[in-house]
Image (spheres, rainbow, N blue to C red):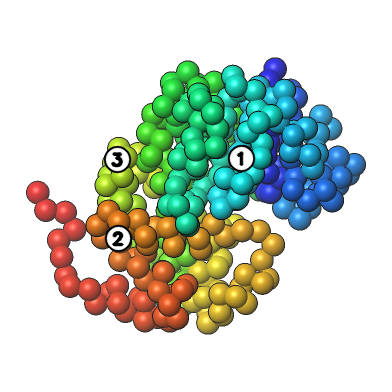
Amino acid sequence: MERVAVVGAGSWGTTLANLLAKKGHAVRLWAHDPAVARRIQTERQNPDYLPGIALDERLEATSSLEDAVRGATVVVSVSPSQFVRRVMSAAAPAIAPDALVVSASKGIEKDTLCTMDATLRAVLRGRLGEEATFLSGPSFALELARELPTAVTVASRSEAAARRAQELFQTPYFRVYTSDDVVGVELGGALKNVIALAAGMAAGLGLGHNATAALITRGLAEISRLGVALGANPLTFAGLAGMGDLILTCTGELSRNRSVGYALGQGKRLPEILAGMHMVAEGIDTTRAAYALARKTGAGMPIVDEVHAVLFEGRQPREAVENLMLREPKAEIWT
């Protein structure tokens, strides 16, 4: 049995904490909002983030970050990506030096352009950061919470750490594969949210399934292009953390990023959309980071460019589609 701290009580953090508690691990879930922690503790529910799911009686919740992580043999970081640096910096002094760190956040810092890997290595001492593991793949929290079959990948530079994380999370309904490609798994999980915004816009404009298929395929090409420029294994993007997560997020009705794109395609403005949301759509800030990384590396990412223009430059979604379609014709693959 492990003593597990799950840092972040949103839908994904609550789901992972509940899964581990049901496996018999001693799990303490940290919530930034004391009211969320109290409700989990007393009512066995987190209705704001995971409606309709009864939480295991063994799951503990707290709003004290130090209490959550002190003595934990495993620390799971599940805060929104733009808050991971601040939260894990605060948690770091209380984390045991031999703990296993699992990152389940998907995103890239918009100011530093750091993935969660780089962020954790900056704030966690020694092997805590160097041997951290990264969980990613096609996984809507609500479906996993209902014990519907789900498969993901956990990546690490340490094979032993990856296997330990695999064993920790594996259940009859949650299948976990391992990978040594931290860069590829991280980028796939982050960048698919940007393409999902584009897919949502296409759906909101009523452009049909052909357009969605094109965006997924060409979006994967852009993700792979940037990934290879940053040192990823291109084969990773054909797997769960690449194509798998991209398909889910671009087509699934539970996708927050697709929903934001859909509303943009229907003519709503971004501030209006965000004002009506309770949870974070990671793709918005990741778009800023992806746009900057494309320019830094020279990787061509025209879909990312158009999503950035819609979000931050006032371009209309239909104009963005026309720009993509009217680009100079080129070969898809030439050998």
Query: Residue 222 placed where, x, y %?
Result: 31, 56
Q: Quadrant of the N terminus?
A: top right
Q: Nearer the viewer, mark 3 or mark 1?
A: 1
Displayed quadrant of residue 309 = bottom left
Q: What distance separates the C-alpha of mark 2 from that of mark 3?
A: 16 Å
Distance from Cα at disc 1 to Cα at disc 2: 29 Å
Q: Where is residue 218 shown, x and y percent of the image?
A: 30, 59
The amino acid on which the numbered mark 3 sits, given as a three-letter code, is Gly
Q: Quadrant of residue 29?
A: top right
Which residue is rendered at x = 35% and y = 68% of the image? 305
- Against 127, residue 86 (above or below) is below
Looking at marks 1 and 2 on the same chain, the residue that comes earlier in the sequence is marked by 1
- Residue 217 image point, x, y percent: 32, 57
The amino acid type, in three-letter code, at marker 2 is Arg
Horizontal side of 104 relative to 117 (left or right) equals right
Label 1 sits on a secondary structure element that is: helix
Percent of width and height locating residue 92: 63, 33
Q: Secondary structure at mark 3?
A: loop
Mark 3: few/some/many CA within 10 Å (<14, 14-19, 20+) = few
Q: Is residue 206 above or below residue 257?
A: below
Residue for badge 3: 231
